[in-house]
Amino acid sequence: MQAYSDNPLLIKAPIGQQPYSLLPTSEQAQVDDLVRLRKKRRARRFGHALVSTLCLGYLVYLASKYTGIFHHGHCGDSVEHDVVHTLSGIGYTIPSNVSLVHCVDGTQDRIETTVDSSQDLYESRSSFQLPLDSATIFLVSRGQNLHGAISVVTSEDQEVDSAKVVVSLYHTEKSQDWAKVCLLSRGQGENGVGIFTPIGRSGHHWDRRSLSYSIAVILPALDSDKPLQINNLETDLPNTSHHVGDLSDVLFDRISLRATNAPMNLELLVTDSSSVITTNGPITGTLHSSLQSVLTTTNGPIKVNVNLTSTEQSNATLIAHATNSPINAKINLLSSVGNGGTFFVSTTTTNSPLSVDFLTSPVDSTLHLVSKTTNGFASVALDPAYEGSYDIATSRYLSARVHHKVPVPEDPSGKGRPREGHAIGSRNEVRGEIYWGRYDENRSNGTVFIRTTNSPVLLDV
Ligand SMILES: *[C@@H]1O[C@H](CO)[C@@H](O)[C@H](O)[C@H]1NC(C)=O
Ligand SMILES: *[C@@H]1O[C@H](CO)[C@@H](O)[C@H](O)[C@H]1NC(C)=O
Ligand SMILES: *[C@@H]1O[C@H](CO)[C@@H](O)[C@H](O)[C@H]1NC(C)=O
Ligand SMILES: *[C@@H]1O[C@H](CO)[C@@H](O)[C@H](O)[C@H]1NC(C)=O
Ligand SMILES: *[C@@H]1O[C@H](CO)[C@@H](O)[C@H](O)[C@H]1NC(C)=O
Ligand SMILES: *[C@@H]1O[C@H](CO)[C@@H](O)[C@H](O)[C@H]1NC(C)=O
């Protein structure tokens, strides 16, 4: 059942287009009639507890490390409570904030094809056009035994004012009508698509074989020098691998990709703010970000190339957090005005090596870096433009080493200033400072803080 995930047909094949606003009135009535909200207090309480725990954990985590330096606007705002909707007598969990506009039903809404009748596998495909200027375009799935793949791509064939969402559901003959694919709305001008399977508590013996889906989000490829601007794209898709294509011509003000148990691969994503969260899977790829990027996974490595741009209006923040897996980040710090800029970078993991490499940084910029791991080699290489202090340490008897680049790099400002520095420390801890030229009241005071245990730590300056 893996073949679906990179199904090239999904994007190429002609797809029956359905203007999203044209809802057959009979079906709308049916949906309205069937959608009876029965608040599920237990789920809600659990949701509250979970949100509180997650937020608290996150705040403690931030507070302990940066005491107020970082902004954190994404705590709680994308974690929604679920409620139970009943459709055709079957219970489905659906995020409470979301309204069902229309659920796909009957063959006029979808294209049925037989994938492999000997294996009882069928595909049911439906598609939606969402306004491109939506405040948010969102994709959500809920239920049981569901897993899938999503890809976000651009296409020259896509209409310039809408995003097409194509959902292919792979099901058995019996399970065809259990899964619901629905057009959703939320808040003001937020449009989405949801995939829901029954919660399985209502005594219905629906086919337990798992259902899978693939989603393609197709954005227009504009023939223009300016990037296509998207306000907000949000996914909340458990068990779903994410692939973001080369979206160098798209600028997302905000993007939030949330999955579990699956990889996140970003070929090239350009955003002001981004949040990429998964579990048990890697986060890989290339990201250009200006305000804030948060990458979080567990039990999966993070291997990313990041261009982090600080503008006159804003500092730039990157947080990469993993557990039990390596972090490997190559970072270009950039300033929209050439020089200066303030950057906050945090890379933390456990039980694994950590490697952070600053390939470029602007003259007179300020970097605040926290890199932490345990039981793994921690290595950080700063760009020669770095000015400020550092503090690196590991467990007793292991080595903390500061390596000075040889030959000594030239002053990146072109003023020919000498590299000045001093350090104190012991075998397993070194603290020091490094600057260009003599004391100057305007010189940047960056901070670099690196920790590991039971392994060496190395800082290259
Ligand atoms: C519902 O959505 C609105 C805006 O989309 C958001 O501000 C609010 O926090 C959400 N509420 C819940 C419970 O998720
Ligand atoms: C995710 O996958 C696991 C294992 O296949 C399954 O038990 C679980 O129900 C799935 N979660 C959802 C939300 O479908
Ligand atoms: C990312 O930064 C590198 C180094 O400055 C630069 O060569 C590359 O063009 C940047 N990419 C973009 C798309 O800005
Ligand atoms: C950037 O960070 C510095 C240091 O914390 C702070 O003084 C400054 O106000 C910040 N600038 C912006 C635009 O947020
Ligand atoms: C950096 O620190 C020094 C010493 O504390 C201070 O004199 C200088 O003004 C600081 N630089 C900036 C840009 O704040
Ligand atoms: C520091 O910056 C201020 C304001 O830009 C400037 O007036 C001053 O001359 C600078 N000091 C040095 C030593 O460059």
Image (cartoon, grey):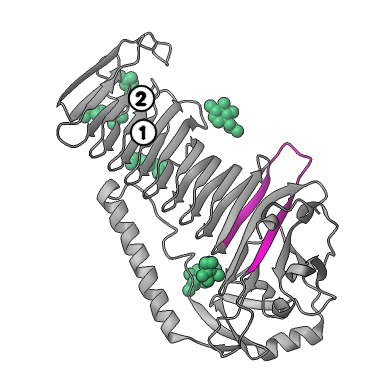
Q: Amino acid at mark 1?
A: Leu
Please tell me whether residue 216 belongs to the stretch shown in magenta: yes
The quarter in which the N terminus is drawn is bottom right
- Predominant secondary structure in magenta? strand
Please tell me whether residue 336 belongs to the stretch shown in magenta: no
Q: Amino acid at mark 2?
A: Tyr
x and y, in percent, of residue 124 in the image: 76, 69
Determine which quarter of the picture holds residue 378. Answer: top left
- Residue 80 appears left or right of 460: right
Mark 1 is surrounded, within 10 Å at the Cα level, by few (under 14), some (14 to 19) or many (20 or more) other residues, namely many
Position above or below: 380 against 222: above
Mark 2 is surrounded, within 10 Å at the Cα level, by few (under 14), some (14 to 19) or many (20 or more) other residues, namely many
- Number of labels in the image equals 2
Q: Residue at x 62, y 73 (%)?
A: 209
- Disc 2/disc 1 C-alpha distance (Å): 7 Å
Residue holding disc 2: 386
The quarter in which the C terminus is drawn is top left
Residue holding disc 1: 367
> Residue 439 versus residue 214: which sits nearer the camera?
214
Position above or below: 412 against 64: above
Q: Which residues are magenta?
A: 211-235
Residues at discs 2 and 1 in contact (Cβ within 8 Å): yes
